[in-house]
């Protein structure tokens, strides 16, 4: 009985040792591999691998690191259209404040949440800060959208009318 247990354990450990196989493997669209007797270097697009392999009659050990390349990126978050509604929320009478870098014409649309046009007005904007007054005191309380369109693009501002 003891002999059967030892044989079973021996077979189990042999299978476990044979099942442990480490092979460095990287799938990439481009890269390269360099090696000599003391180590190897493999690289891929945006990744770098540094490994060293030790071998003996009983096994092979490959150790090292793979480090992605540090890449910094940034986005220009400056908004070319600088508009705001004041006060917000409003009783219906509010100012559209536009900061402009030059003289231009713009179109202002005010929509309700159903998409119906409440106001459509062309405004002449001068260099610097501009203030345009709108009066919607006869309209229902709720959320409205003001769309400002100029040569640089569109800017939409949400505002609320409260009849208090």
Image: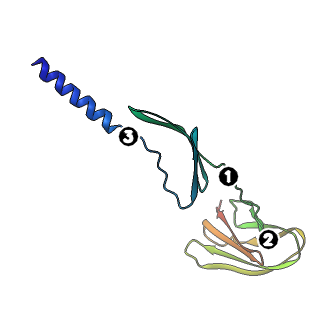
Circle 1 sits on which residue? 71
- Tell me how many marks there are: 3
Nearest to the observer: residue 23 or residue 27: 23
Quadrant of res 20 = top left
Circle 3 sits on which residue? 21
Q: Label 3 vs label 1: CA separation?
A: 34 Å
Q: In this orientation, does residue 50 appear?
A: no
Is 134 situated left or right of 24 in this image? Answer: right
Question: Foreground mark, 3 or 1?
Answer: 3
Q: Earlier in the sequence, mark 2 or mark 3?
A: 3
Circle 2 sits on which residue? 133
Nearest to the observer: residue 55 or residue 20: 55
Spot occupied by residue 106 in the image (x, y as percentages of width and height): 78, 79
Is 81 situated left or right of 60 in this image? Answer: right
In the picture, which quadrant includes the N terminus? Answer: top left
Residue at (69%, 63%) from the top-left corner? 91
Q: Label 2 vs label 1: CA separation?
A: 47 Å
Spot occupied by residue 127 in the image (x, y as percentages of width and height): 90, 71
Disc 2 element: strand
Is 65 situated left or right of 92 in this image? Answer: left
Q: Residues within 10 Å of mark 1 (few under 14, many from 20)?
A: few
Disc 1 element: loop
């Amino acid at each position: 009985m003891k002999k059967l247990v030892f044989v079973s354990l021996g077979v189990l450990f042999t299978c476990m040792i044979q099942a442990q196989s480490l092979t460095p493997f990287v799938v990439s669209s481009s890269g390269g591999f360099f090696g000599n007797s003391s180590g190897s270097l493999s690289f891929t697009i945006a990744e770098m691998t540094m490994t060293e392999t030790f071998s003996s009659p009983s096994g092979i050990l490959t150790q090292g690191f793979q480090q992605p390349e540090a890449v910094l990126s940034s986005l220009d978050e400056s908004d070319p259209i600088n508009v705001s509604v004041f006060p917000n929320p409003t009783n219906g009478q509010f100012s559209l404040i536009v900061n402009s870098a030059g003289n231009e014409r713009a179109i202002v649309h005010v929509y309700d949440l159903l998409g119906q046009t409440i106001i459509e007005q062309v405004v002449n904007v001068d260099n610097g800060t501009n203030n345009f007054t709108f009066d919607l005191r006869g309209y229902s309380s709720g959320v409205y959208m003001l769309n400002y369109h100029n040569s640089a693009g569109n800017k939409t501002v949400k505002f609320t009318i409260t009849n208090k």
